[in-house]
Amino acid sequence: MKDIMIGVDLAKSVFQVHGASMTGQVKFRKKLSRPQSQKFMAEQAPAIVVMEACGGAHYWPGRS
């Protein structure tokens, strides 16, 4: 496992992704659409991933 932790803030249309070393050094910050976030995460080395979401983040248009 790489020395990195990826934080993901889930929202309706975009994800805010923040990468940091285990000591807290910022590695990256990105604003990604849902399709971009899936591709981005698939390209990452194994890492600890933490997620944060509000109630509205779980709404998916077109789903009943």
Image (cartoon, grey):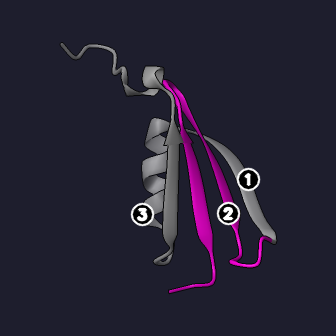
Q: Amino acid at mark 2?
A: Gly
- 59 vs 38, nearest the viewer: 59
Instruction: Residue at 42%, 63% (x, y): give it.
Output: 42
Q: Position of residue 6 (x, y in %)?
A: 59, 62
Specify whether residue 17 is painted magenta. yes
Q: Position of residue 15 (x, y in %)?
A: 56, 39
Q: Of marks 1 and 3, which one's residue comes earlier in the chain? A: 1
Mark 1 lies on residue? 29
Residue 11 placement, left or right of 59: right
| Mark 2 in CB contact with mark 1 (< 8 angstroms) | yes
Query: What mark, if any, has residue 14 been given in the picture?
Result: none
Against 60, is 2 above or below? below
Which stretch is magenta?
Answer: 1-24
Specify whether residue 27 is painted magenta. no
Distance in Å between CA atoms under marks 3 and 2: 15 Å
Mark 3 lies on residue? 42
